[in-house]
Image (cartoon, rainbow, N blue to C red):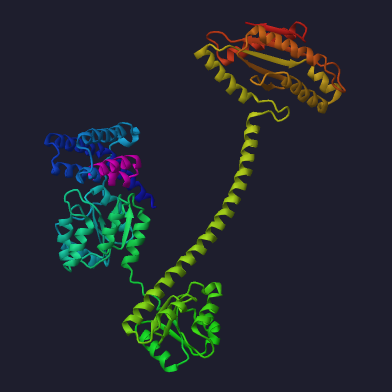
Amino acid sequence: MKAGLEKKLVKLREKFAQQLPDRIGDIENRLKELEQEQWDINSLNALKRSVHTLAGSASTFGYTRLGATASSLERLIKQALNDIVDREGFMDNLKKEVQTLKNFYSGMDPLDHRVSEKLDNFYEPDKPELPARVATEGKRLGKKNIFIVDDDKLQIESLADPIKQAGYNVFGFTTLSEMEQAVKENPPSVVIMDVIFSDTDMSGPKAISLLKEGNKLDVPVIYISHSNKIEDRLDAVRSQGNAYLLKPINTELLVKKVHDLTTNKKAEPYRILIIDDEPDVADYYSTVLSHNGMNTSIEHDPLRVLDRLETFRPDLILMDMYMPACSGQELAGAIRQLDEYINIPIVFLSGESDISKQLHAMSHGADDFLQKSISTEHLISSVTIRAERMRIVSRLNELKDHNVELERKVLERTAELNEKNSVLGDLNRELQKMATTDFLTSAFNRAKFNQVVNADVDRFNRYHIMISIILFDIDHFKKINDTCGHEMGDYVLKETVSIIQRNLRKCDVLARWGGEEFIILLPETSLDDASKAAEKLRLIVENYEFPCASQVTISFGLSQIREGDNSKTLIKRADDALYNAKRTGRNKVVALR
């Protein structure tokens, strides 16, 4: 969908949301009138029309729950009109349904209530008061005219633009009388017609039928409706409607339907293979069918029929039942053995009048049995109907094969995308790890630790959940590097982190603070408990035997959060405590409250 069109449709949706209070208010007022009139049939019909309009518009603009509620209310009113409801309980049920509509609106997202600004240069359906303008503009621009007939102006606007952008003139009518007046002057190329109108009891199909009966309209009609009832679809068929689309309307499909109905497509002639050992008879039927626009091919020898099938590719086979080389039944059976011809129509043409023999022949692969005394009109009609069905079946099979191929490609593409997404997910996780962890030790880095500690400080300020900090440093680390080399120094760093990580809780957060300095966040931990944990870690490291290095010891500085602290002040006290530990002999734990 083009960006400009999409933007306009969004604004139309906003416009509909803006009108919702008035629409629901109108339904409430009609409900009050009905209650005051005590089951007045006119009031009930007026209520039904208002609800029907809301149901169709809500579906069109994507408010499916609102549309479903309005449709439910409409069905309830129709039951009342058919006098199949309990009148005493009807009003209560009616009020409940209307209240549901109000509740839906009050519960909508605030964005759906926003008032649209004035839409400058927005498409307005041409005025029906000037029907001559339809022909004048169409002739001037060389465009075909499309009539949209719907009692909801917003519905017309939502359909008009995509059709207009496809190169058509579009004229909107909100009443049947307006459309009928325009049709009298200048018939359109296609009419897009709502099924039910709120201003009259006459349906769209009924109005179209009357126009066609009076020879006032002879153009294709596309019906639109939120109703999927078989009764409404039958009315559309009986009025010779060409399509029936449900709201919300798929505008791309609608434009395609309009294009198909306004494009003069010359169908390829039906290909009819005639198999008959009598040349004069075969020539006769070939002449009749060819004169009526069909391509024919004659084969006198049934034993050569497979070659003829391959080269001619017929839509239908018309064959004699009795031939010298083989019977029609035998030949039909042989043809049906081939998968590509299993559905091709086979019609026997014979002088056989015995019904039992005709039925027996049809049970062996034929689709129809025509006597050679058949009238040319009957022959043409029978052949045309079956050939057309064959075309449809062939097209459906082509579409099926195409869909299978598309599904295969989609599955392949999906598998490819899934594989790429998996790789991308691994890369994203790796990037996330690189962004939050120290490359050498795999502990969290300083940036990640600051993120975590700031969140826990906020929790303390809101809920007074205690946290403590342990800052520790490997004693005389430079001496390890100088004595054993930097490679051993890196090993000591990694091994120390591994030892400490194994002896922390899952909730504790260990990070490299810088150089040989590390920091630990202990959630929900007092300073006393943190001191015990630090002393345990100090002893574990002191007693661990590192290869190619003298005894490794650690100095610890601890702090506990207090009122008014932020992460910087909390860590600063731990750093001061660590400085005291190192200044007073190292390999010890010092805590500052």
The span shown in magenta is 53-77
Residue at image position (39%, 52%) is 1
Is 411 on the left-hand or right-hand side of 202?
Answer: right
Is 15 on the left-hand or right-hand side of 294?
Answer: left
Magenta-highlighted stretch: main secondary structure? helix
The location of residue 455, given as percent across then percent down, is 55, 20
Q: Is residue 102 above or below residue 195?
A: above
Q: Is residue 122 visible?
A: no
- Which of 434 and 70 lies nearest the eye of the viewer? 70
Q: Is residue 316 visible?
A: yes
Number of numbered discs visible in the structure rendering: 0
Is 327 on the left-hand or right-hand side of 368?
Answer: right
Q: Is residue 581 above or below residue 393?
A: above
Tell me if residue 67 is in the magenta stretch: yes
Q: Is residue 122 above or below residue 351?
A: above
The location of residue 358, given as percent across then percent down, is 43, 80
The location of residue 483, given as percent across then percent down, is 86, 21
Q: Residue furthest right?
A: 548
User: Can you say which quadrant of the picture contains the C terminus?
Assistant: top right
- Which of 246 and 564 lies nearest the eye of the viewer? 246
Tell me if residue 188 is in the magenta stretch: no
Residue at image position (61%, 38%) is 428
Q: Is residue 502 above or below residue 410?
A: above
Residue at image position (19%, 59%) is 207
Q: Residue furthest left?
A: 37
